Amino acid sequence: MSGLTRMIHLSVDRTLAPSTASVQQLEGMQIPGLSRWPRGVDPEMFDPGFRDARLHAELAPNGETLVGYVGRLAPEKELELLAHVDRLAGVRLVIVGGGPEEARLRALLPGAAFLGVLHGEELSRAYATLDVFAHTGRHETYCRAAREALASGVPVVAPRAGGPIDVVDEGAGFLYQPGNGTELASYVAMLVDDPHLRAQVSASAHRSVRGRSWQAVNDRPVEHYREVCGSRVTRAARRVG
């Protein structure tokens, strides 16, 4: 045990991490008092009601199914996997975000629509207008984008690693082997080819985030604080007794 870890072990009652993967990583570092504090989503900003038929028609003039990614365009996001999706028949890939990989991705994904960095209502509309959300990076601590897509009523296909394991409930999307572009594309194709299945998963996606607003999840740290204070009071009383 390092000197820093030993100091943490002696002084910390509770350590909060945003995902199961983060908890496991910290366990390997012998960090004490671990508990998961999941992140929330803004249900007023991300909702199926923002779906924009006109925007969908602009992005899919031939009736394509819109499959999108929202996030930073960086090497660790493994966005080259989207090339497998870009080749699917009847699909238009939509990329929202910016970053150092943009030029390479534009060349790699010639059929994709790059919308740049969006904020506010433009971002809300972009999420809700997608038909499927595809995430590629396996190193997400939490994966906020997947939660925002679910709140927007969009089925999520993401790696079975990191944050998505906690975020994507059964029935709200699919988890694939990290780095496996063929499996990613197969799940996307399943949703593209079966509108009835896509509608079912879309409804489940939206339901899966009910009760997970920021207000709801922010009550949990208060509970942790009370538990820790209660434990300290109990230990102090025992020492006195």
Image: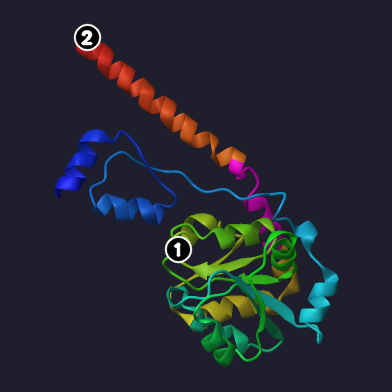
Q: Residues within 10 Å of mark 2 (few under 14, many from 20)?
A: few
Question: Is residue 213 covered in magenta?
Answer: yes
Residues 76 and 185: in front is 76
155 lies above or below 234: below
Taking the spot 55% from the left edge, 58% from the top edge, the residue there is 144
Taking the spot 24% from the left edge, 34% from the top edge, the residue there is 11
| Residue identifier under label 1 | 140
Q: Where is residue 7 in the image (x, y as percent from the top left)?
A: 19, 40
Q: Give the total of numbered labels.
A: 2
**Range drawn in magenta:** 201-214
- Relative to 37, is 229 on the left or the right? left
Q: Quadrant of residue 10?
A: top left
Q: Position of residue 177 (x, y in %)?
A: 44, 73
Q: Quadrant of residue 124?
A: bottom right
Q: Where is residue 36 in the image (x, y as percent from the top left)?
A: 42, 45
Q: Who comes first in sequence, dot 1 or dot 2?
A: 1
Say what amino acid the circle numbered 1 marks.
Answer: Glu
For mark 2, give the secondary structure: helix
- Relative to 130, is 53 on the left or the right? right
Taking the spot 50% from the left edge, 61% from the top edge, the residue there is 164
230 lies above or below 158: above
